[in-house]
Amino acid sequence: DALSDIDPTIQSVLIAGKAKIASLEGHYHQAQNYFDGAFSIARHEVKKNPGSAANNSLAYVHYEYGLFYKHLYSPGAALEQFVQAQGLNSSAKLKSLLDFQIELLDIENEKKTSLNRLIRFVNRFKDTNLTVMHILGLQRLGILLHDRRNYEEAERYYKDALYLAETNDLQYLVWTIKNSIGLLLHKQRKFIDAVTYYESFIDSVESHYLKSIVMKNLGLRYRVMDKNDKAIDLVQDALEYAQAHGVFSEIPGLALLAGKLIRDYSDTPQQAFHYFKIGYDVSMEQQEAGLPLTGSRLRAVKEYTEYVTSQLPESFHNITVSNYFEWAKGKSWVRVQDLFHYNFFVYHFIHTGIGQKTFKHLDMISTTFYSLAKRMRDLRGIKFPDLKDADMVLPADLYFESLQKYVQLHRDKTFKEAGAQFEHDIYEYLFKESGYNKKRLSQSLDLSYSVVLKNTKQFTEASETFMQPQLEAPR
């Protein structure tokens, strides 16, 4: 409410500041909403009162938005924002911030190797009394040297940054730097020291975002020391903490880590499915909300897909063209269609995503599926499985590996296209199996002779509508 009484030029800057705070706490959706508001006000002000003040405000919003994209692991999009800010800006201080971030991106993307120019920018922050940026710059130099295994120099920069953060009572920066120091101790193979260090400050961390990260890092240190139960418990606690406090940015990564630890180091590896599924679901929800599928979100999606695929029988990958449809012999047409639909949607729910993700991919409305599922359940007693259940079992009389492989071949088709392709291919197969005897085929499928005549006519005439299925490598 107080923002309404402030000069519009400053308003956009303050809202961008709120977006920054939201992003630092992992509230990415909220941050995006703030940025939308900041851009709207700043651009309106540029049109209404063009000049350096309005341009600088819009430039600052672009700058903060670039940092937001860095949080989202989208360096290309971040650079675009920084470049747009440069084109608008006339502020010396903002110029120094932009120069630093662009130089840092070049180094992180390995376009440059020397840190000399970056060091000069960090020293300039000190000379111009940009204390927070000076501290962040020292920490970033420490991280870069850490990654290059120059641990002594990294430690020196971390200690300088920590001293300044503590002296200026910048508690958030104190926690972030201590987290970096804990990681450095681990890299130096001082595992016990790393655990002791994390334990010394974890209870004092008040930021929900940083708390979940520190809990995760301490859990990983326990894992290195073979304290597996303790590691799993702490990572699970970190996930629950992030979920309880809405630290959405960390949920995919924490769920992924919990799943891996449980799969590899517990007596109940089957419980990993639950955590991989959480990571996948949240990642897809965030993508649908507009966040890029990068970083921990992308890793969570890939791990879930690989995990589910690994649970399939080895024989799944040894299907040949000749036995795609052997399961259909002697079955009625209604049963054949039901089995196709069952396997079709099970495949897509596993590999494409449960619910709207699959419906969008198949270009179908959700009510079409729910109507089909209800008809199969009420009339034929066929129920689709609950894929969120770690103990889920796919019935042998419904789930066919060869049919899963067939669906895989046509995974990029829409629902209508895949259905039409299947109808063509299954009729051709069964027609051949019947010895090209239409009467025998109509009896086998429990269909009228006229229907079979209509659907087999295409095999006695030239048709370029469909192509025979060809084996191809899974994507």
Image (tube, grey):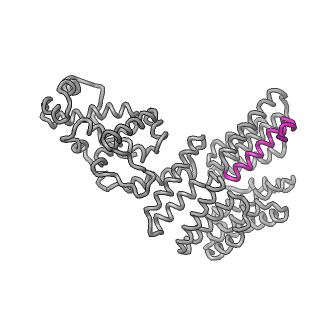
Residue 218 relative to residue 260: left or right: right
Q: Tell me: residue 470, above or below residue 390.
A: above
What span is in magenta?
1-26
Q: Position of residue 263 (x, y in %)?
A: 46, 64
Q: Residue at x 74, y 43 (%)?
A: 63
Magenta segment: does it hold 282? no
Q: Residue at x 30, y 44 (%)?
A: 403
Q: Position of residue 438 (x, y in %)?
A: 15, 29
Q: Residue at x 29, y 37 (%)?
A: 337
Magenta segment: does it hold 8? yes
Q: Majority secondary structure of the magenta segment?
A: helix
- Residue 391 position by quadrant: bottom left
- Residue 179 position by quadrant: bottom right
Q: Residue at x 84, y 35 (%)?
A: 8
Whether residue 166 is visible, yes or no, is yes
Q: Tell me: residue 282, above or below residue 4.
A: below
Q: Position of residue 277 (x, y in %)?
A: 49, 53
Whether residue 457 is visible, yes or no, is no
Q: Tell me: residue 181, above or below residue 431.
A: below
Q: Tell me: residue 351, above or below residue 158.
A: above
Residue 395 or residue 352, whichever sits in front:
395
